Image (cartoon, helix red, strand yellow):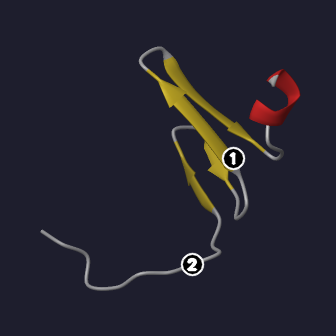
């Protein structure tokens, strides 16, 4: 079933993780990281 509505810039929370607008999300086979800032720039 497809959702019939959408929203932008809203806070989501599930699985004990809070996802805020502007968050950076990094994921691989081992897990997911949600950060408030761009972590990739610090490693490059």
Picture residue at 57% right of the left edge, 78% below the top: 8
Q: Name the quadrant containing residue 21.
A: bottom right
Q: Farthest bottom residue?
A: 5
Q: In this view, does 18 lie above or below 12?
A: above
Which residue was labeled with disc 1? 24
Compared across the picture, whether 11 is left or right of 8 comes to: right
Q: Position of residue 27 (x, y in %)?
A: 52, 30
Q: In this view, does 11 lie above or below 32?
A: below
Q: Is residue 25 above or below residue 39?
A: below
- Mark 1 or mark 2, which has the lower sequence index? 2
Viewer-nearest residue: 14 or 10:
10
Q: What element carries label 1?
A: strand
Picture residue at 81% right of the left edge, 47% below the top: 36
Picture residue at 65% right of the left edge, 75% below the top: 9
Q: What element carries label 2?
A: loop
Quadrant of the drawing holding the N terminus = bottom left
Q: Farthest left residue?
A: 1
Q: Residue 8 carries which label?
A: 2
Q: Count numbered badges in the picture.
A: 2
């Amino acid at each position: 079933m497809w959702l019939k509505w959408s929203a932008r810039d809203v806070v989501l929370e599930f699985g004990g993780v809070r996802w805020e607008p502007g968050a950076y999300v990094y994921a691989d086979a081992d897990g997911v990281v949600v950060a408030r800032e761009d972590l990739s720039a610090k490693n490059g």
